[in-house]
Image (cartoon, rainbow, N blue to C red):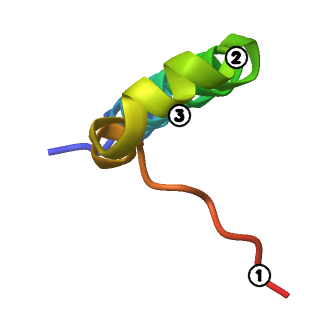
Amino acid sequence: MELLASDIYIPIRDMIVAKRQQLARQLVSLLTDLLQRTTEGPLQRQRRGLKGLLRTPARIESVQ
């Protein structure tokens, strides 16, 4: 059986597309969360309290 370039290229391309979509969804989620936090007032922030902290997605830590 002959191995064609498309036998390798197509699965790799599909993996890259899937990863790009996953990263795009994560970015939208983080930006939405950031926008919500910057537009909410102190009362909403206080009301969110512990529940909001439990729902908060994992933060990206900077490496120093």
Say above or below: 35 vs 30.
above
Contact? badges 3 and 2 (CB < 8 Å): no
Q: Position of residue 47 (x, y in %)?
A: 40, 25
Say above or below: 61 vs 14.
below
Q: Secondary structure at mark 3?
A: helix
Q: Amino acid at mark 2?
A: Leu
How many circles with numbers are drawn on the protein?
3
The residue indicated by pointer 1 is: 63
Q: Earlier in the sequence, mark 2 or mark 1?
A: 2
Is residue 39 shown to the viewer in this render?
yes
Q: CA distance from mark 1 to mark 3?
A: 20 Å
Q: Quadrant of the C terminus?
A: bottom right
Q: Secondary structure at mark 2?
A: helix
Is residue 18 shown to the viewer in this render?
no
Contact? badges 1 and 3 (CB < 8 Å): no
The residue indicated by pointer 3 is: 23
The residue indicated by pointer 2 is: 35
The structure residue drawn at horizontal position 41% and vertical position 44%, both measured from the top left corner, is 57
Q: Nearer the viewer, residue 57 or 11?
A: 57
Q: Nearer the viewer, mark 1 or mark 3?
A: 1
